[in-house]
Amino acid sequence: MHQAGELEPIRWQDESLLLLDQTLLPAQERWFPVVNVDEAIEAIRTMRVRGAPAIGVAAAYALAAHAARLPDAPLPRWLDTLSAEAARLAAARPTAVNLAWAVERALQTARGTGSVGEARERLLALAHRLREQDIATNRAIGAAGAGLLPEHGGVLTHCNTGALATAGYGTALGVIRAAWEAGRDISVFCTETRPWLQGARLTAYELVRLGIPARLLADSAAGVLMAQSAVHAVVVGADRIAANGDTANKVGTYTLAVLAHAHGIPFYVAAPMSTVDPATPTGEAIVIEERPADEVTHVGGRRIAAEGIGVRNPAFDVTPARLISAIITERGVLRAPYPAAIAAAIAAASPAQGVSA
Ligand code: MRU
């Protein structure tokens, strides 16, 4: 039985959201305050907070902080002002559905109140609840998925899906952690995850901190390790899961799914039900965020690419459902055919458990 210390990157202190700056990790652990929507948008766009569940919870706290400072006005006018700000916040990153989902939950909560004071209180209570629910949900995902990982063997993961990408514990990394804590003899391969290096900077940091045996790979090394039979399962997170199971996640995930399929290796997606978007019928309808060119042409602020070269920088890709062996959620392990399994999981969950139905 292995045990590990906790890392919870989203806090509330002195009427402010406190975020652990993920652009500085692992070199520095620095917290910074967010007190309004503009600061939250900046933090989300610049990746100081990232990971689908984390940006959802951070957005709920940011709206609570903003509401606490929004001058008093008659309730309908106050709500109109808050809604306009919330719409800007929801658009800060387009692919992860958790952001829009959390903002919508906050607006519904505020609209259901009878005074500005009550709205402020309930917004903060909601943010606390989403944070606590996210941690509990991730532990449930871990418990549901741990048994899918090998008793002995290599598990490959991509990007960062750990405590840092959530309110705590993590999704795909939570499954790995739960398997390790249950005594499974696993060894993790984490991909660097160019261009932001979430794997090298964040997942490696979390794995070392947790004491889980792990090795870092260049993204392009995944194929050779699979060909050498070193990888026995792949587990990744998700930014949006369509109603048919097609899954958007960090760019490179689709490549790994194709490779896993070619080598007969199980490929698992681990995500909370709040990442399932029943309003998105298939992966084709998912908006893929394109990020600035300098993220590809530069490393650590230093130009590495030839001046004048064009760049494509999609931040996510879509893995078709047919390449996914199972989707691990807090409602259990979903298997193909996904449209029916997803619909049943949505129907089974109460609104309080956070399903975006
Ligand atoms: O661009 P990022 O770092 O926000 O992308 C993160 C991912 O793609 C994660 O895999 C996903 O959000 C799931 S996090 C539990």
Image: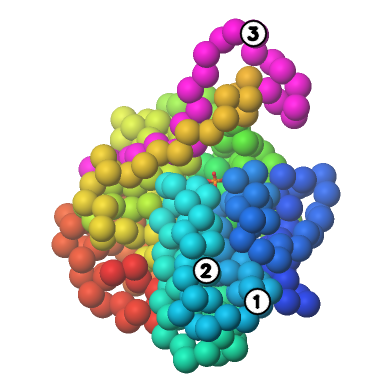
Left or right position of 293 against 233: right
Within 10 Å of the Cα at label 3, are there few (<14), some (14-19), or many (20+) other Cα atoms? Answer: few
Looking at marks 2 and 1 on the same chain, the residue that comes earlier in the sequence is marked by 1
Report the Cα–Cα distance between label 1 and label 3.
50 Å
Instruction: Tell me: 119 left or right of 234.
Output: right
Q: Earlier in the sequence, mark 1 or mark 3?
A: 1
Q: Look at the image and tell me whether residue 249 can be seen.
A: yes
**Does the magenta-highlighted stretch encompass residue 57?**
no
Mark 3, residue position: 306
Tag 1: amino acid: Pro
Q: Position of residue 249 (x, y in %)?
A: 43, 44
297 vs 330, left or right, is right
State yes or no: Cβ of the residue under disc 2 lies below 8 Å from any atom of ligand 1. Answer: no
Disc 3 within 8 angstroms of ligand 1 (CB): no
Q: Residue tagged by mark 1?
A: 71
Counting every numbered tag in the picture gives 3
Residue appearing at x 83%, y 49% in the figure:
28
Q: Is mark 1 within 8 Å of ligand 1?
A: no
- Residue 146 against residue 231 in the figure, above or below: below
In the image, residue 43 above or below residue 260? below
